[in-house]
Amino acid sequence: LAIDAARHLIAVGFAFGLLIAVSSRLVPTFTGRSFPHPLAADRGLALLHVGVALRSLQALAPLGAVQVLQISGLSGFLVVLGFLPWACNLIGLATQAPVTHDTSDGTSAVPGSRAPAPTGRCDPGGDARA
């Protein structure tokens, strides 16, 4: 049971936790769109880690604490609940209308950005290498 708990700590706790955390930051940055529910992925990540912590309690069963196996059984349900907010955010982001950079006033259409929209030309007074 200790090897099973360690496998879940590494696979679910670290790898999937890293996947959710990094993609929750990078996907909105690369797409220029914000998540429909920005805090949902963070809450889902918390549920995922609670599920992993409950799963790791099964390592105590060989030491005589057999009743922790009942609590450990709840971990799979919490891990799945942790993935749902993240998946719903990704689906919501994928179904949003694409971002356009062409605006009449020359400002960016990217949410949260104050930079001017790209014009495809270099600034005559600025450094062309930048």
Image (cartoon, rainbow, N blue to C red):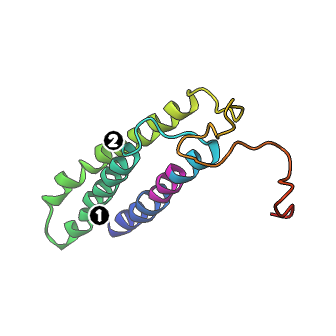
Dominant SS type (magenta): helix
Residue that label 2 marks: 81
Drawn side of residue 15 relative to residue 123, left or right: left
Disc 2 is placed on an element classified as helix
As measured in the structure, the alpha-carbon distance from the residue carrying label 2 to the one carrying label 1 is 18 Å
Residue 82 lies, in percent from the top left, at 36, 46
What is the number of callouts on the image? 2
Q: Residue at x 32, y 65 (%)?
A: 1
| Frontmost residue, 102 versus 104 | 104
- Give the side of residue 66 with respect to residue 114, left or right: left
Q: Is residue 36 magenta?
A: no
Image vertical order of residue 99 relative to residue 41, above or below: above
Segment tinted magenta in the rendering: 17-24
Q: Which residue is most to the bottom? A: 63
Between disc 2 and disc 1, whose residue precedes? 1
Mark sitting on residue 56: 1
Q: Secondary structure at mark 1?
A: helix
Q: Nearer the viewer, residue 32 or 110?
A: 110
